[in-house]
Image (tube, rainbow, N blue to C red):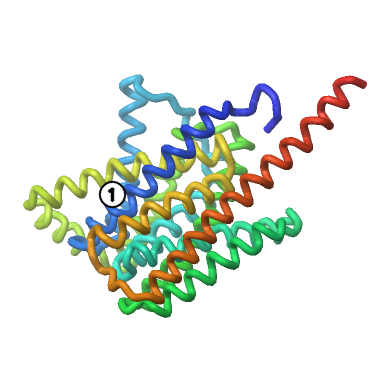
Amino acid sequence: MGADAGEPSSVLSLAAAFSYGVASMAMVFVNKAVLMQYVHSMTLLTLQQVATALLIHFGQVLGMSKRKDFNLITAKKLLPVSIFYNANVGFALASLKGVNIPMYIAIKRITPLAVLVSGCVRGKGKPPTQVTLSVVCTAAGVLIAALGDFSFDLYGYCMALTSVFFQTMYLVLVEKSGAEDGLSSVDLMFYNSILSLPFLFFLIIATGEFPHSLAVLSAKTASLSFSVILIISLVMGIVLNFTMFWCTIVNSALTTTIVGVLKGVGSTTLGFVLLGGVEVHALNVIGLVINTFGGVWYSYAKYKQKKKATWKIQPDVESRAHK
């Protein structure tokens, strides 16, 4: 994307980043609340995608939203994005069943490390020292916190780490796809939800969730409190998808990752007092503090790096303009 008319305004960039941060933080707690009563995570994800596709479709029919017509060539190009997205969310939901919220967020903060490694593999070069040290600090915090996590769940930890890998691949692909094909957030959401459904239907049948999960869901919806939480979860799934695509297209995959790290500071604090499941231990708290510090340090280091790069480019553009 060019550096002139095509560049998003700082207000738009900030709005996209802030929206994603708030939606992402709320989604962790909403999903955890649903999964505490309803363990069928893949069925929950399938329902969220069905709700997204239906909302966008009826929104266009009623003239409330605009999207490009479904194109088979674009769909083929976006298929890997959809697979990585669903793998990320599916493994994240599976991990939330056994991992408490502060530890889940701490593990997900390793995403910047994966993004950096991905950048090096793609030939982006060696990152600055501060960025490298902050990422090491974040990862070290996770290890220390895990040693003090009395509710340690190996399966949950493995699921969360696998989710980190898929989230990294997914963010890189979204950034590339949105920029190359000129797709809006709504376009990407619609393609993602439609392409997800066959994959998810296969999974809920293969894992044995279906049709038992629907019978359990039908029984659970007799409870008003559960029905309200489920509806909020479906709506938040749509909001989170939109804000994540929006933030990644308007800013970058890296910015989306940084926002994810920063919102984790609030989520970690709230996680100790909301929804339970956390046994407070000195080692656990020290590890989470180190992990949070590393995350904030990483965000600051990346901000400085980006500002330095922008400042460096500006004089070059000006000197060329005067030639």
Residue 155 placement (x, y as % from top left): 37, 76
Give the vertical position of 146 relative to 198 (above or below).
below
Quick one: 316 or 269, which is closer to the camera? 269
Q: Which residue is mark 1?
A: 47
Relative to residue 277, is residue 131 drawn left or right?
right
Residue 19 placement (x, y as % from top left): 42, 37
Give the vertical position of 319 relative to 143 (above or below).
above
State which quarter of the image contains the N terminus: top right
For label 1, the SS is: helix
Q: Is residue 77 something that shows in the picture?
A: no
Q: Quadrant of residue 131?
A: bottom right
- Residue drawn at x 31%, y 76% is 151
Residue 206 placement (x, y as % from top left): 34, 67
Q: Quadrant of residue 33?
A: bottom left
Quick one: 239 or 301, which is closer to the camera? 301
Quick one: 4 or 190, which is closer to the camera? 4
Relative to residue 43, is residue 305 drawn left or right?
right
State which quarter of the image contains the C terminus: top right
- Residue drawn at x 48%, y 53% is 261
- Residue that extends furthest to the left in the rendered view of this protein: 222
Q: Is residue 192 something that shows in the picture?
A: yes
Give the vertical position of 285 relative to 256 (above or below).
below
Q: How many marks?
A: 1
Crowd tier of the residue under label 1, counting other residues whose Cα lies within 10 Å: few below 14, some 14–19, many 20 or above? some
Relative to residue 189, is residue 206 drawn left or right?
left
Q: Amino acid at mark 1?
A: Leu
- Residue drawn at x 38%, y 67% is 103
- Residue that extends furthest to the right in the rendered view of this protein: 323
Residue 88 placement (x, y as % from top left): 45, 58
Q: Quadrant of residue 283?
A: bottom left
- Residue drawn at x 30%, y 72% is 280
Give the vertical position of 62 relative to 214 (above or below).
above
